Image: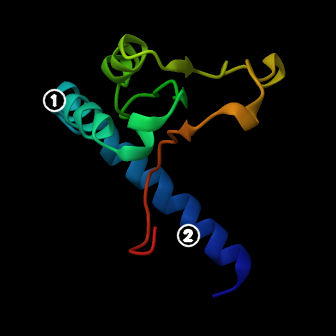
Amino acid sequence: MSEPDVVSAKRALRTALRAARREIADQPARSARICGHLREIDAVRSASIVMLFRPVPGEPDLAEFAAWCRSVGKFVVVPDPVPTAGFPIDPSLVDVVLVPGVAFTADG
């Protein structure tokens, strides 16, 4: 498969998976499970500064996790969705970055 074909196939797969993700019925329950799991990760527990994402439809809502982070003294960074807004702090200070993903191979 040529590189343009691979790029096209990946784009089509991501589009299909995003559509499927938006159809998941248990969005609040899934978000709560994810937030609970995140609180148990050693890197998160030891972090001082955690960067989160603003969810789009179908992605987990991390508001509960952000509230927990703040309640235990962590600084929470949520970048502005406007690309020209700049980053709110020096990126090298961030200990943990949570990034949404659509699909992964067995190797991540």
**Circle on res. 104:** none
Q: Mark 1, residues whose alpha carbon is within 10 Å: few (<14), some, or many (≥20)?
A: few
Q: Residue furthest bottom?
A: 1
Q: Quadrant of residue 3?
A: bottom right
Q: Is residue 13 left or right of residue 30?
A: right
Q: Is residue 28 left or right of residue 67?
A: left
- Residue behind mark 1: 29
Identify the residue shown where x is 74% and y is 37%. Answer: 92
* Depicted 80 relative to depicted 12: above or below: above
Q: CA distance from mark 1 to mark 2?
A: 32 Å
Residue 66: image location, x then y, percent: 41, 19
- Residue behind mark 2: 9
Q: Is residue 29 left or right of residue 72?
A: left
- Check disc 2 and report its element: helix, strand or loop: helix
Looking at the picture, tell me which residue is in the foreground, 62 or 74: 74
Identify the residue shown where x is 48% and y is 51%. Answer: 15
Callout 1 amino acid:
Ala
